Amino acid sequence: MRSLVLIGHGSHLNGESAGAVYRYAELLRERGLYDEVVEGYWKEEPSLRQVLRTVRSTDVTVIPMFISEGYFTETVIPRELGLGHQGPVPPEGVGRVLGGKTVRYTLPYGVHPAMSDVILARAREALPDLNPEDTALIVLGHGTTRNQNSNRVVYENAGRLRESGHFAEVHALFLDEDPRVGTWPEAVKASRVVVVPFFASEGWHTLETIPEDMGLTGQVTEFADTPNAPQTVYYAAPVGTHPDVAEVVLQLAQEARGASGAGGDEDRTHAQAWEAFLALARRGTRIGEALITPQAGMFELRHALDEGRHAADLQTLVTVEGLRDHTRRDEGGHHRPVHTLRNLPRGWRAILTEAELPRAVHNLYPAVVEESYAHHTHNLRATPWPTTARRQTGIYTKVIRATPEQVEEVARDVCSRCLKTRLWAGERLGSTVFSGVPGAIPCAEACTLLVAEVREEVSGKRGQTGHGHDH
């Protein structure tokens, strides 16, 4: 048995941020090469602190779904996973045994040499008849003066594609460092130019910044006033959204330190938690705001406040993904990064098999079954706020300066809207969902939303910009 974990950044503010990781997880599940594919996030759930608890296998490979090495892949993710590693990740990855699980942590997918093939595929989509006689390629990176690894992968891909002979010339240009994208007219001599953004997803930069800096008017732009005019620029989609990235991820996983086809065993604690929960579900149960009812060999899930409403009055969802996507926003259309906030939308019902139920409940309430069972069996260890605060790095280091009063002030706003009981703040929870109490859910550690809000409080910015900045 083997588990594959895809790690994304996520967002407290924007539900689209996690979309690419969800899509790749779905593609990889369809391949069937791993017993399960699980997503984890820095700014959403399941969090990096929870995600290893949610996997079924004792053999786990973790892939950071980032386009380059940097702060998140070298500092944040290893720290939050408890890998005991900081700094550059070696080519073969990092291997650790954590809580009885063999965990392999790899480089981000964007640095794999196979990404050159993905860049070429994007270029051919934008210009099917490209040829080395008259076509130049621009590999366009974000760049930063803070981390030299960010530009290295762009230069390496440009070098490989230059040697491939597919283009008359190949240039590496950047948004935030030299050579900048705005210098392309002086740098490129070919009459046809393909621009491939080396970005993980569509977003503000690919949709607005790059076209503006280059003077593009669409996917194809004719230039009659450049030094080497006439020139035609063909603008490709970002590499990170190409389906072939799934193959790159699989290659990374296969090359990871100590990877073997034999796999591991089923994690016994995880299995016990879900066996206990399924026993409850077969009799009908509630978890949080969701009501689960057995129906003729299937299961119906709906909002508990919709109990008794006729099925015809509710929108029927028939896939795990459909339920996930529908419940990631509240009734006002706002993103729900913390799923245990009391804002699960109403007006739907999902009809699923018993085999689908665990993943559906996991999507509704990530890690709640595992952590509730651990607390129910007296095996959940809480992490006090001072410990969480001391662990923070980067822009969040300042939360260590927060007074108890400031933390409580933020918690009154954030945590009062949540179903969970704050074990990390010393609160006691005598029952759990396994005791038949739907809202009795433990919170072992302050979530990243609370950490972010405490940072805003310490900075004196809280309340000035909505719910803070989503760094």
Image: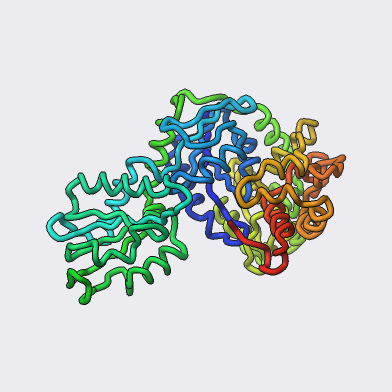
Disc count in the image? 0
Image side of residue 347 versus residue 27, left or right: right
Q: Quadrant of residue 229?
A: bottom left
Image side of residue 387 versus residue 100, left or right: right
From this viewpoint, which residue is outermost toward the bottom? 224
- The residue nearer to you, when weighing 24 against 435, is 24
Image side of residue 155 versus residue 357, left or right: left
State whether residue 167 is above or below residue 426: below
Residue 60 image position (x, y, % from top left): 53, 32
Q: Considering the image in quadrants, where does the C terminus appear? A: bottom right
Q: Quadrant of residue 130?
A: bottom left
Residue 293 visible in the displayed image? no
Residue 448 image position (x, y, % from top left): 67, 50
From this viewpoint, which residue is outermost toward the left? 133
Residue 459 image position (x, y, % from top left): 70, 59
Residue 431 visible in the displayed image? yes
- The residue nearer to you, when weighing 229 against 287, is 229
Image side of residue 285 versus residue 14, left or right: right
Q: Please report the residue visible at 54 percent of the width from the left and 28 percent of the height from the top.
A: 59
- The residue nearer to you, when weighing 358 against 21, is 21
